[in-house]
Amino acid sequence: MIASSVTLDPGVVIHHPDLVNLYGCTIGEGTRIGTFVEIQKNAAIARNCKISSHTFICEGVTIEDGVFVGHGVMFTNDVYPRAVNPDGSLQSDADWEVVPIRVKRFASIGSNATILPGVTIGEGAQVGAGAVVTKDVPSHAIVAGVPARIIGRVKDAPVEVLSAGGM
């Protein structure tokens, strides 16, 4: 289902529009969205991205131009998720805070990665399949594992990017 609250720029391709769930989000020009993807309100996908099937992009996620998101990637936006308050009452939107995630341009996120709240994935970075990203990823870094750790750098990336610290 594509809700009327969705902003789709020209050239967006949604494979099987009846098998996605998009509401209150913005999708940039030339972006392609696979089957069984959910993108929630206040999420923004920029231009020329590829969002592969079975991916969940929650409220508060910003994805910049040219980002690849593999199959089954899971973004999260709540540091302390709970169903109920201490008194047992059901939580509402007022009982928690959205913690944003930013994926900078030309980054690539492998299948089944999980991206935790508050993380920034740097420009041109690569996240390995199945990684759990708990900290910011420097630009042009390659990270993998649980939790994700730097294992290399993207070929032809500036050396000074990784020498500045990071994970």
Image (cartoon, helix red, strand yellow):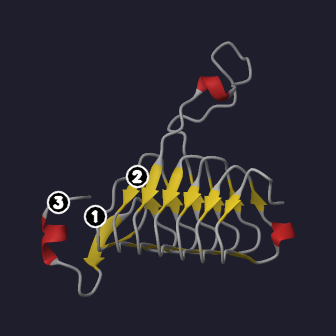
Residue on which the image places disc 1: 138
Using the numbered discs, state the Cα–Cα distance from disc 1 to disc 3 in whole angstroms.
8 Å
Decide which of tag 1 and tag 3 comes sooner along the chain: 1
Decide which of tag 3 and tag 2 comes sooner along the chain: 2
Nearest the viewer among 97 and 5 is 5
Residue on which the image places disc 2: 119
Q: Quadrant of residue 92?
A: top right
Residue on which the image places disc 3: 165
At label 2, counting other C-alpha atoms closer than 10 Å, the crowd grade (few under 14, some 14-19, many 20 or more) is many
The answer to whether marks 1 and 3 mark residues whose Cβ atoms lie closer than 8 Å is yes
Q: Residue at x 52, y 69 (%)?
A: 130
Callout 3 secondary element:
loop
- Which quadrant of the rendered structure holds the C terminus? bottom left
Image coordinates of residue 34 in percent, x first then y, are: 71, 75
Q: Mark 3 is on which residue type? A: Gly
Q: Mark 1 is on which residue type? A: Pro
Q: Residue at x 17, y 60 (%)?
A: 165
Q: Mark 2 is on which residue type? A: Val
Using the numbered discs, state the Cα–Cα distance from disc 2 to disc 1 in whole angstroms.
11 Å
Using the numbered discs, state the Cα–Cα distance from disc 3 to disc 2 in whole angstroms.
16 Å
Decide which of tag 2 and tag 1 comes sooner along the chain: 2
Image coordinates of residue 57 in percent, x first then y, are: 61, 57
